[in-house]
Image (spheres, rainbow, N blue to C red):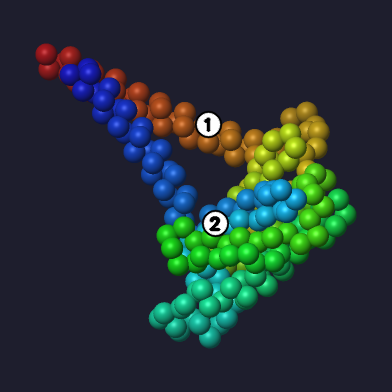
Amino acid sequence: MRKYICVQIFLLLICFFAANHSLRAHDPDQITYQFWQEEKDGILTIHLTPKGAIDLLRYLTPELQSSAVIQVGQYSSELTQYFNQSIDLNIQGQNIELELLRSDLVNHDAVMEFRLKSFPGSFENYNLQLSSFTEVYRHVTNHITLELSDGAQHCELNAENMSCSSRQTLAAGDLSLANQASLAGYFRLGGMVFLLLGIYFFWREMYYAKS
């Protein structure tokens, strides 16, 4: 019986992590931006959902509100213009513009990939202002990852906080957005572990009470 309960808890943990990852991957108000380097070129890859692309297009083009079917692939230029306006990236004093490389807005994992024009060769000393989707969704989280020489930097931006920049020394008691997000994840994980332990001990007591 005890072995059976442990298997049940293990399966519940697997389901929890799978569901958490799946919900984030398919939620239209959770958008991921990956700034990375390919040889000397800077690349931005945006991961969103087809629904997110459609909601954005309906916001940008009001006449699409009544359209039952929208061919999102036909609006790559409108989306490129939008992201150039909503993503203000400055690296080493150089303003960066986006040039569309490819887009796939129909498949399950919709993606747009841009080349960073005037890229200086690294993401060091950058400043990013990003407001994408904040006017489309009431609650939106833009997940940012940038490749720096000392590792990747992560930021989570929303309507209340639309900017992040190169790592700086933190004052005592301060936490970066990435650390806050990590702590929140640990608290959620800890809560789930305690919940599952409570279920385990409850079942254990019930089992021994009957035997």
Q: Residue at x 81, y 60 (%)?
A: 118
Q: Residues within 10 Å of mark 2 (few under 14, many from 20)?
A: many
Q: Amino acid at mark 1?
A: Tyr
Crowding at mark 1 (Cα within 10 Å: few <14, some 14-19, many 20+): few
Give the residue at x 49% y 81%.
Answer: 65
Mark 2 / mark 1, whichever is N-terminal: 2
Q: Position of residue 90 (x, y in %)?
A: 81, 56
Image quadrant where residue 66 sits? bottom left
Quarter where residue 158 is shown: bottom right
Element under label 1?
Answer: helix
Residue indicated by mark 2? 47
* Quadrant into which the N terminus falls: top left
Seen at 75% across and 50% down, the residue is: 40
Residue ID for mark 1: 186
Q: Is residue 208 above or below residue 26?
A: above
Give the number of the mark in front: 2 or 1: 2
Which residue sits at x=61%, y=71%?
Answer: 79
